[in-house]
Image: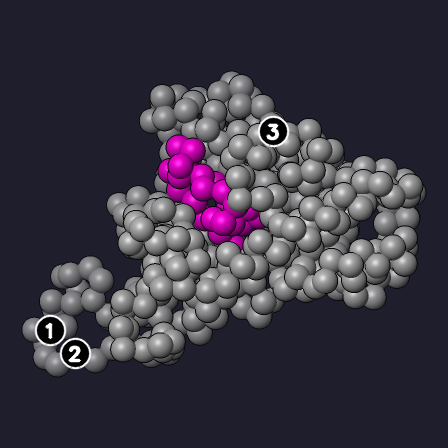
Amino acid sequence: MKKSWGIHTTAIHTGMEIEPRDVSPPIHMANTYLFESAEEAAQAFEMEGQPIYTRWGNQTTAVMERKVAALEGAEAAVATSSGMAAVSAALLAAVQAGDHVVATTGLYSGTHHFITEDLPRYGIETTLAEATDPAAFEAALQSNTRVIYLESPGNPALLLNDLAAIAEIARARGILTIIDNTFATPINQHPLDLGIDVVLHSATKFLGGHGDTMGGVVTGPAGFIQRVLKGPIRRFGGCISPFNAWLIARGIHTLPLRMARHNANALAVAEWLSEHPLVAWVRYPWHPSHPQIALAQHQMPGGGSGVVVFELKGGLEAGARMLDRVQLCARTVSLGDVRSLITHPASTTHHSLSQETRLSAGITDGLVRFAVGLEDVEDIIADLDQAL
């Protein structure tokens, strides 16, 4: 990436150097590549980065990887088949049997289960630390702690980790920090600038942005990214389809534009909800009702992103009635789409967690997660109004 480029130019032009004669990057769907001779084949296996087999690397995938690395300000990136493939690959590249992981509360449910159930099966101990308290992370550290895993804003309660404070704690002890930056995106938050080591995304969400593909990505130091690629990705097979990588790279072209709209629409919706007589509470990182608004505006200078959570005064039953009445907004899981998506986490995305675990992460039974889309905000609010 050229250091003088702005965010829009970076999103559009990074990666184009791979196929400099193409206005739009081609899709390389080949699963393997030809060699001119036995000698060339042997050399390809000696040298990293040579086209051999798409599970090992692909030119189309490389365009997506370079775009995300440039936007995050990272040395390198590796694409994966899904967000959970990114989570699992990053962690498995960082720890081994006998190690210990400290993770934030308020995680996406798939990540929570992987950290608390799957990692222990491999002899890796895990501890959860209260998301909003850096001292809790420090208190949870052990002599064998190798990773602090973060997710900020957290899914779905939008709890924030103090990234700079936690990164300082980790650096002083030589502990790797990893963050899921899906909700914020590199447009709104730059964890590497705050001292975090590795940043990952579910590219299915805002990076792709159109609800039509799945993927993930891990960014960070080149050496660590090679460990992720050579280990979990190649051996567990969580590589991305070139077509999905092409869709995500195309989505990234408009990521800065889309995030500006997501930010503005979500803040307007949060402001409207906060004044509605049927709304018990609302939370959005850049709205004054968020208890960590000062931290949000400091470490998310680009904006509060596109997700608002709230609860109605009638609790679970009132929320269910409202979801049944929406017309413009789509009743579905996921987020980061051009269309507004609304869901009830306790019965969908986080239903597999115990009520105790959900409540400890701020996920009340009546919480509604609203992924605000790019429609005219007046139309979004009108739909919520008639549903309420």
> At label 2, which amino acid type do we have?
Phe
Instruction: State which quadrant residue 58 falls in.
Output: bottom left
Residue 294's tag is 3
Which marked residue is nearer to the observer: mark 1 or mark 3?
Answer: 3
Cα gap from disc 1 to disc 3, whole angstroms = 57 Å
Q: Secondary structure at mark 3?
A: helix
Give the class, few, some or many, for how many residues have Cα within 10 Å of label 3's Cα (few <14, many ≥20).
Answer: some
Instruction: State which quadrant residue 94 falls in.
Output: top left
> At label 3, which amino acid type do we have?
Ala
Measuring from the top left, give residue 165's x and y in whole percent: 47, 25
The residue at which mark 1 appears reads as 40
Measuring from the top left, give residue 129's x and y in whole percent: 57, 27
Q: Earlier in the sequence, mark 2 or mark 1?
A: 2
Residue 170's tag is none
Q: Secondary structure at mark 1?
A: helix
Q: Earlier in the sequence, mark 2 or mark 3?
A: 2
Query: Which quadrant does the N terminus fall into?
Result: bottom left
Q: Which residues are the magenta region?
A: 178-202
Residue 35's tag is 2
Q: Residue at x 64, y 38 (%)?
A: 285
Q: Residue at x 20, y 59 (%)?
A: 48
Check residue 197 for magenta coloring: yes
Q: Residue at x 21, y 80 (%)?
A: 34
Q: Residue at x 57, y 30 (%)?
A: 295
Measuring from the top left, give residue 370's x and y in whole percent: 73, 52
Viewer-proximal residue among 340 and 333 = 340
In this image, 308 relative to 64: left or right?
right
> At label 1, which amino acid type do we have?
Glu
Task: Report if the CB atoms under discs 2 and 1 are less than 8 Å apart.
Answer: yes
Which marked residue is nearer to the observer: mark 2 or mark 3?
Answer: 3
Instruction: State which quadrant residue 15 falls in.
Output: bottom left
